Amino acid sequence: YYSHSNDYLEICRCYKSIYEIPSVKEDPAKWIPVLRKICWYLVLAPHDPMQSSLLNSTLDDKSLSEIPHFRSLLKQLVTMEVIQWTALWNTFKDEFENEKNMLGGSLGDKAADDLKERVIEHNILVVSKYYARITVKRLAELLCLTVEETEKHLSDMVVSKALVAKVDRPMGIVCFETTKDSNDILNSWATNLEKLLDLVEKSCHQIHKETMVHKAALKV
């Protein structure tokens, strides 16, 4: 079912469940093909909190050292550096195509295209960490895409809430905004409220002081 809908993250979670079976974990001939599939589907899945959590937990798995090529693949996705698609594909193309001979078969008809999409998304997120503003032309150069392709990918990521950005088309400029998690927003609100209450208290003291001075002046 998940394969037909290309729900890579759910496919990954299914393989993760298989990977956790004791009889599988005891036999390298069984768990290595499963772990390979977990790595591939993690890379193919769009970036979101669940994908990020599974990616990091998989990287922490000591068994991954048995397939260092795949550890290298995952490391690229958590490193804040632009990935050159051509170099990555040349490095992992044989492993990618070899999956059809492994447990579970090929990764799907769209997998190669989706892998390129994920690399582009990763690169846009990396650029957004280093730039508050950048021209669309320069961003397209960094992504090795046309301006039109760059605008489409930006738009798709904004719509899916994977990125907060605004594109000024007449000026040809992209403005990236930092996303805040709920804890940061709550802490900021609490701090601002505390400052407001402190200001109100000081104002009340000042008003009371002025009132007392005024009353004393009237008595004189």
Image (cartoon, helix red, strand yellow):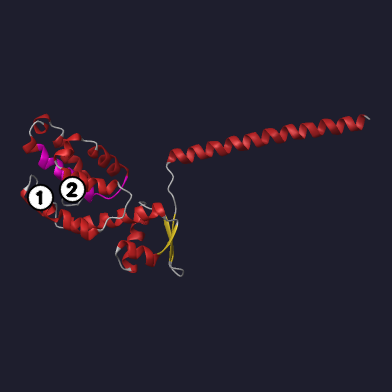
Q: Is residue 171 visible?
A: yes
Check if mark 2's residue and mark 1's residue have beta carbons within 8 Å.
Answer: yes
- Left or right relative to 138: residue 90: left
- Residue drawn at 13 percent across, 53 percent down: 96
Question: Badge 1: few (under 14), some or many (20 or more) residues near its Cα, within 10 Å?
Answer: some
Q: Is residue 61 above or below residue 77?
A: above
Magenta stretch contains residue 45: yes
Considering the whole magenta stretch, tell me its main secondary structure.
Answer: helix
Mark 1 lies on a secondary structure that is helix
On the image, the x and y values in percent for residue 197 come to: 63, 34
| Residue linked to disc 1 | 99
Q: Looking at the image, tell me whether mark 2 or mark 1 is earlier in sequence order.
A: 2
Question: Badge 2: few (under 14), some or many (20 or more) residues near its Cα, within 10 Å?
Answer: many
The answer to which quarter of the image holds residue 128 is bottom left
Which amino acid lies under the numbered mark 1 shown in the image of this protein? Answer: Glu
Per the rendered image, the range of residues in magenta is 31-48
Per the model, the C-alpha gap separating discs 2 and 1 is 9 Å
| Residue linked to disc 2 | 40
Q: Which residue is farthest right?
A: 220
Q: Is residue 114 visible?
A: no
Q: Is residue 214 above or below residue 115?
A: above
Give the number of marks.
2
The answer to which quarter of the image holds residue 159 is bottom left
Q: Is residue 45 above or below residue 207?
A: below
Question: Where the C terminus falls, by quadrant?
Answer: top right
Residue 13's tag is none
- Residue drawn at 6 percent across, 38 percent down: 29
